Each structure stands twice: as structure tokens, then as C-alpha cells.
Image (tube, helix red, strand yellow):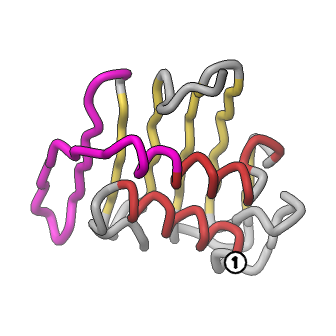
Amino acid sequence: MKRDRPNKMRIWSGGCFGNNYELTFDGSNLIYSARIDDVTTEDLISATREDWEAFRSEIDAIGIWNWHAHYDNSDILDGNQWEVKIKWGGRTCRIDGSNDYPTEDGTPSQTGEPADTFSRFLHAVMRLAGGRAFDR
């Protein structure tokens, strides 16, 4: 039987000089935090079973479980970094990136801009976070 929510999850996106966003789930609480213009906010999110099902359906559809462990575009300095750690039942992913993002087949885009696949992932995160911002 598939679990209706993850065991644990941490999703982070940000950079040295820009805004930072984080969504964490410790098995009980879903917490959104953001640092925007040096102001940090934190919210406890009430995600429904349907919210979790929609999120799981989308991450399965984009193939997150098959993404590479690391994405890096060394031609771009500073920029955007991100990290995804999800343990959901028997599935686990630990993925990070620096100015590079997975494409539809999981290969690095090497463009410096999020590929459609990663944009879909960010939108799924934003929906789970109740519409709160989670982009660069």
C-alpha cells in the first residue's frame, strides 16, 4: 500500500544573495519558510490527503525518482542552488543542483534556466505549500 504522505521531506531553493525557500515535513508537520529581502517568515501548512496525493502524482509523473543525484552548471557562478530530499515509503531521493536542472529524461539541461520538468516540480511544491512562493 502506498503511503499517503512522505516519511520525511526537505525541499530548498535559493542563493547567496537572493530569496530562499524551504518546505519541510518531519512526519507530522509541514513547514514552509522563506527569506525574502532579509525578512524570514515561517508557516505551518495544513495539507490535506488530496494535496499530498496530487503532489505524489506529479513527482511520479515527472520521474523525480530517476533524477541524477547532482546537477551543476559550472559556467554560472552564484545564481540558484536547490536541494530535494524525500523519503516516501520505500522510495528515496537525494538531489541537489547549482544553476542546472533536470530535463524530461532526467539529464542535465545545462542552460542555467529551469527546464519544464523542474518548473513542474516547483509548481507542485507551491501547490503543496498552499500557493506560497517557491521560485528564484
Q: Quadrant of residue 37?
A: bottom left
| 89 lies left or right of 14 | right
Q: In this orientation, which residue lies closer to the viewer: 100 or 88?
A: 88
Q: Is residue 50 magenta?
A: yes
Considering depth in this image, is 88 or 11 the residue closer to the camera?
88
Q: Is residue 56 above or below residue 134?
A: above
- Few, some or many residues within 10 Å of mark 1 (<14, 14–19, 20+): some
Q: Where residue 66 sits: x, y (%)?
A: 83, 44
Task: Check disc 1 and report the residue beneath it.
Answer: 116
Left or right, residue 38 beside residue 101: left
Residue 24 painted magenta: no
Quadrant showing the C terminus: bottom left
The residue under the point 62% across, 21% down is: 89
Q: Nearer the viewer, residue 7 or 54?
A: 54
Q: Left or right: 38 with respect to 135?
A: left
Give the residues in magenta: 27-53
Residue 34 sits above or below residue 80 on the image: above
Q: Nearer the viewer, residue 17 or 102?
A: 102
Task: Tell me the kind of residue under disc 1.
Answer: Asp
- When the figure is inspected, residue 90 is found, relative to residue 117, above or below; the finding is above
Q: Residue at x 75, y 80 (%)?
A: 111
